[in-house]
Amino acid sequence: MAPQILRAHERTPAPWKNGGGVTTEVLAHPEGSGTDDFAWRISLADVAGSGPFSAFEGVDRIITVVDGPGMALTVDGTEHVVDTRFAPFAFSGDATTDCRLLGGPLVDFNVMLRRTEAKGDVRIERGPTRLEPAPGTRVLALVLDGTASLHKDSVHLDRLDAVLLQDDEDPADIAVDGVLAVVSLTEVR
């Protein structure tokens, strides 16, 4: 099976669950799932103003600032300044979370994992890397800045394009001229 290429220009933005912003889904599992029944969901969000985050009971979240000056997230009463681009920050979707923008709108990269169904992590790569799904794991790589190229298929990825590898696929070497988020996703059994 060949890696699945997910082009940024093919995505459709939609309002947030709480109506406070716009999200663009990169991929969710199972296919066709919504915000209430995904096992995992990967998206990009345009955050235009300060305000509360939607609550996602039973979900772990990892958020990464892609563009903009950052935000202060108050998670269950504790403030966390998330103002470094490309630095993943993990928190509970169950928590009461409020966002205060630090100087203007931003775009963030979101990974949401329903604890009873999936676990995962996000790492940032700034140079050549190998995408190698372990058994039972999928790997999604999204270009946060710059470009990337898959060597084995000579596929060029522009900014915000992504590639998904299943656990039964051969590893793929990827050249990165910029910043790449690599998400490992494993189903909980």
Image (tube, rainbow, N blue to C red):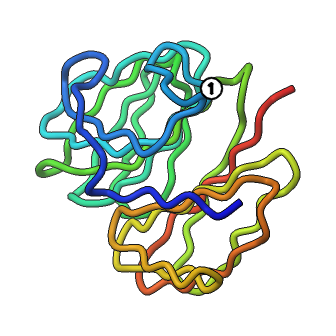
- The disc labelled 1 sits on which kind of residue? Ala
Q: Residue at x 28, y 32 (%)?
A: 99
Image: 47 above or below 173: above
- Can you give x and y, in whole percent of width and height, for residue 121 in the image? 66, 49
Instruction: Pick the quarter of the image with the N terminus.
Output: bottom right
- Quadrant of residue 178 within the rendered picture: bottom left
Left or right: 7 as drawn, with respect to 76: left
Q: Residue at x 51, y 41 (%)?
A: 111
Q: Residue at x 37, y 30 (%)?
A: 74
Count of marks placed on residues: 1
- Can you give x and y, in whole percent of width and height, for residue 66 in the image? 33, 59
Q: From the viewer's side, name the closer residue of 183 and 58.
A: 183
- Quadrant of residue 59 within the rendered picture: top right
Q: Which residue is mark 1?
A: 39
Instruction: Pick the quarter of the image with the C terminus.
Output: top right
> Circle 1 sits in a helix, a strand or a loop, which is it?
loop
Left or right: 17 as drawn, with respect to 106: right
Left or right: 163 as drawn, with respect to 186: left
Q: From the viewer's side, name the closer residue of 121 and 187.
A: 187
Left or right: 102 as drawn, with respect to 125: left
Within 10 angstroms of label 1, few (less than 14), some, or many (20 or more) residues?
Answer: many
Image: 145 above or below 31: below
Image: 59 above or below 163: above
Q: Residue at x 13, y 51 (%)?
A: 103
